Amino acid sequence: MGRIGSGQAQLVGAIIKEVSTGQILGHVQQTQGLAKKLLQAGGSAVQAGFAPLGLINVAQNEQIKARLGQLSQGLSHLQSLQFANMALTGIGIGVMVSGFVVMSRRLNAIEAHLDTLREDVREIGKMMQQAELRILFSDMRAALKDLEHVATRKDHLSLASALQRQFSTQVSRFSDLLEQAMRPAKATTLPKERLDLIWSLSSALWLCQEAELRALFVSEDMLHVQNYADLYVQENLKHLVDLNPDALARLIAASQEDLGSAIALRLTAASDLSLIADGFSTAIENLGQQRSLAQALVDAGISGRDFIQAATGETEKPLLFIPSNA
């Protein structure tokens, strides 16, 4: 880590690279200690684990960056922008280490907002039935509760494998809903709330993907960590392409008859779509980090279960360092 301070190395996501050669020197993994610092520094938006698009305006985004910028002064190798992306998406550095209380708070906020959207916008209500949502989120909540302590269980291998299968099913369900939300079909106009729906479903999808990979680390199945990380990189890339910001912004602006109102709404929609696109980019980067991290653990002969226990149990140091054997 000292080579980062001297400028000989740089941190790219969770990967430490030598500046002169580009060689990978190691990886970093956030700990429970960093997660707590983020919660303390980020304010209410970060503590909730999720914020609707309507609440993430430019001013608030800058306030979050400013608060977390102060935190980054104590961690000079991390950028305040990286902290801000972590705060807005809930996606951290390396494997997710949050406890059940934090994960559940994030899930509950997403569920509550989806319920509001479903009730307020008839079109969205047709896409998502209340019973379907309740079952989906209830199953997810139960799985997250088991995920918190699976690494300490004697039967951790079988339980982690079972949890991985549950999360995989939930990833597929949220991905299907997200595809449907992104598909304007033959619509000539769209409500602005459609973007909030896309953001909320994306946030749920990212949480499921993170949880599934954590279960795979505990199950010691590093090959499947890499395979699923690759798969979800491709799925997130597809969602990013399907997002089609210009087309969606035009359809949303078309709901206004007045030209001035239409232009203003299109600009607002474009800003929201930019945040969604940044979220997908953050998810893609994190999945790549976890793929590389899994190989680093194999090369170093480190147990995935022991690694998760170390990261979740560390409350003082913000980061763990895993050197590369290359």
Image (cartoon, rainbow, N blue to C red):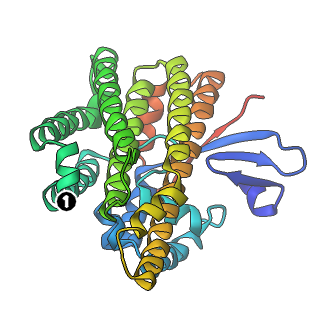
Q: Residue at x 75, y 54 (%)?
A: 10
Q: Which residue is mark 1?
A: 121
Q: Residue at x 38, y 31 (%)?
A: 212
Q: Residue at x 48, y 64 (%)?
A: 250
The answer to whether 287 appears left or right of 120 in the picture is right
Name the residue nearer the viewer: 159 or 274.
274
Name the residue nearer the viewer: 260 or 206.
260
Name of the residue lying farthest toward the left: 131
In which quarter of the view is residue 254 placed? bottom left
The answer to whether 175 appears left or right of 231 in the picture is left
Q: Answer yes or no: is residue 29 visible.
A: no
Q: Position of residue 147 (x, y in %)?
A: 28, 33
Q: Answer yes or no: is residue 218 visible.
A: yes
Q: Residue at x 29, y 46 (%)?
A: 99
- Which quadrant holds the C terminus? top right
Name of the residue lying farthest toward the bottom: 260
Q: Position of residue 198 (x, y in %)?
A: 36, 52
Question: Tag count in the figure?
Answer: 1
The answer to whether 59 appears left or right of 295 in the picture is left
Name the residue nearer the viewer: 286 or 234.
234
Q: Secondary structure beneath disc 1?
A: loop
Q: Position of residue 111 (x, y in %)?
A: 20, 51
Assess disc 1: are there few (<14), some (14-19) or many (≥20) residues with their C-alpha within 10 Å of its C-alpha.
Answer: few
Name of the residue lying farthest toward the right: 20
The answer to whether 130 appears left or right of 66 in the picture is left
In which quarter of the view is residue 284 placed? top right
Q: Position of residue 306 (x, y in %)?
A: 45, 29
As drawn, 99 above or below 37: above
Please name the amino acid that badge 1 sits on: Val
